[in-house]
Image (tube, rainbow, N blue to C red):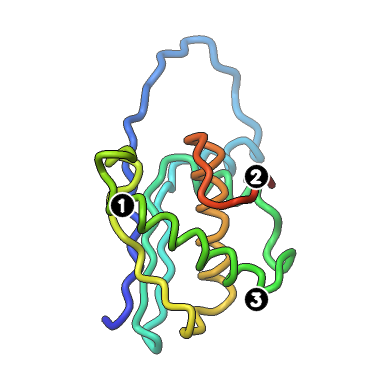
Amino acid sequence: MKNIIHLLFITILAFNCNTSRTAPSPKDERLENIKENDTVTIANEDLEYEIIIIEPGFNFWLQSTARPEGYYSQNYLETRNYQYVIEWNQRVLQPQRYNQNLYELQIDYQPNIDYGYEVNYKLFNYFIYFQLKYNQRLGPWVPRI
């Protein structure tokens, strides 16, 4: 594949014992299923790219908290993603300064390639989720929903 974008982030989960649980409603069951599916994969064989995001809670956050698809323009998402990727890759290359567990792999994101709306939307939202969850700042903007 020409351009592979891999985001592999595995974090440690803390498990709690909870003996007093009420029966979940159908809506709660749907949200629980989303929580269980923590891997988001986006692939396009024509452009030969792939994004794999393994982050506990991201899929749930994407479906329950993130702005809906169509809220941002593709141009806006591409611009922000490119700036986030530059900062991300700089942090990967400075493991003595930034946490290696947070910034493990570089992201190969080329601004001259049209990855499409879905890829840019999910990548952008991952950057927002990452910044909020780990109290990081990848650009001059305050991350918010």
- Name which of mark 3 and mark 2 comes first in the sequence: 3
Element carrying mark 2? loop
Work out how far the residue at label 3 is from the one at label 1, CA to CA, in angstroms.
Answer: 26 Å
Q: According to the image, label 2 marks what residue?
A: 142
Residue type (three-letter) at the residue carrying disc 1: Val
- Residue at left offset 50%, top offset 39%: 136
Pinpoint residue 124: horizontal percent, then vertical percent: 56, 60
Question: CB of mark 3 within 8 Å of CB of mark 2?
Answer: no
- Residue at left offset 48%, top offset 85%: 112
Residue type (three-letter) at the residue carrying disc 3: Asn
Element carrying mark 3? helix
Foreground of the two, 122 or 89: 89
- For residue 95, what is the image quadrant? top left
Q: According to the image, label 3 marks what residue?
A: 75
State which mark lies toward you, 3 or 1. Answer: 1
Q: Locate the N terminus by quadrant.
A: bottom left
Pinpoint residue 35: horizontal percent, then vertical percent: 49, 41
Q: Residue furthest bottom?
A: 46
Quick check: can you spot residue 123?
yes
Residue type (three-letter) at the residue carrying disc 2: Val
Q: According to the image, label 1 marks what residue?
A: 92
- For residue 80, what is the image quadrant? bottom right
Eyeballing the image, is 4 above or below 23? below
- Left or right: 7 with respect to 118? left
Foreground of the two, 67 or 90: 90
In the picture, the disc for residue 81 is none
